[in-house]
Image: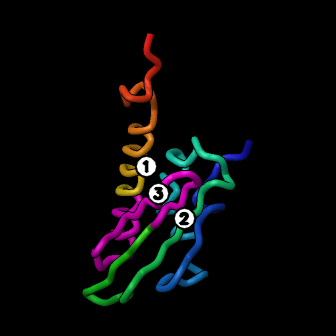
Amino acid sequence: MPTPTVAGSLRLEYGVKPDEFDHVVGVLDRLDERLRSFRADAVELRLNVKERNEPSQRTTLEAIIAGRPPIVATSDREDFDAALTEVRDELIRQITDAKNRTEPMNNPNLRDSL
């Protein structure tokens, strides 16, 4: 079964140009390891940047994973690469937290009782 990758799951929305795709994937590719436990067809990533190159710039990376609520990471950093790094790391943290809450070894309510 194929696993999802940033390159295969990412959709660039407003504020990000199509010719930036490879650069964005290069910054976000650390997400690949965290996404590996899902089916490739179950993951969609959406990236958008409001008010790009303005002091009020806001970068949002959203993960839509089938069967789970959307996971959203945001950054107010003005530097685009710094914002990408921040949303990547925050999304990794949130996905990890969500997975830990649903795994039986980490959630006593999901463990089999003897």
Q: CA distance from mark 2 to mark 1?
A: 12 Å
Q: Which contiguous range is marked in magenta?
A: 62-88
**Magenta span has 49?**
no
**Magenta span has 70?**
yes
- Assess disc 2: are there few (<14), some (14-19) or many (≥20) residues with their C-alpha within 10 Å of its C-alpha: many
In primary-sequence order, the first of circles 2 and 1 is: 2
Task: Indicate the amino acid at tag 3.
Answer: Pro
Task: Indicate the amino acid at tag 2.
Answer: Leu
Q: Which residue is mark 1?
A: 95
In the image, residue 39 lies at what x, y percent?
A: 65, 47
Q: On the rendered image, what quadrant is the N terminus found in?
A: top right
**Which residue does the image show at 48% across and 60% down from the upper left?**
28
Kind of element beneath mark 2:
strand
**Which residue does the image show at 47% across and 85% down from the upper left?**
15
Front-lying residue, 92 or 19: 92
Q: Is residue 16 left or right of residue 101?
A: right
Task: Indicate the amino acid at tag 1.
Answer: Ile
**Which residue does the image show at 35% across and 70% down from the upper left?**
83
Q: Which residue is mark 2?
A: 45
For residue 106, which quarter of the picture? top left
In the image, residue 107 lies at what x, y percent?
A: 37, 30
**Do the residues bearing badges 2 and 1 touch, measured as CB atoms within 8 Å?**
no
- Assess disc 3: are there few (<14), some (14-19) or many (≥20) residues with their C-alpha within 10 Å of its C-alpha: few
Kind of element beneath mark 1:
helix
**Which residue does the image show at 50% across and 85% down from the upper left?**
14
Q: Extreme top residue here?
A: 114
In the image, residue 51 lies at what x, y percent?
A: 36, 89
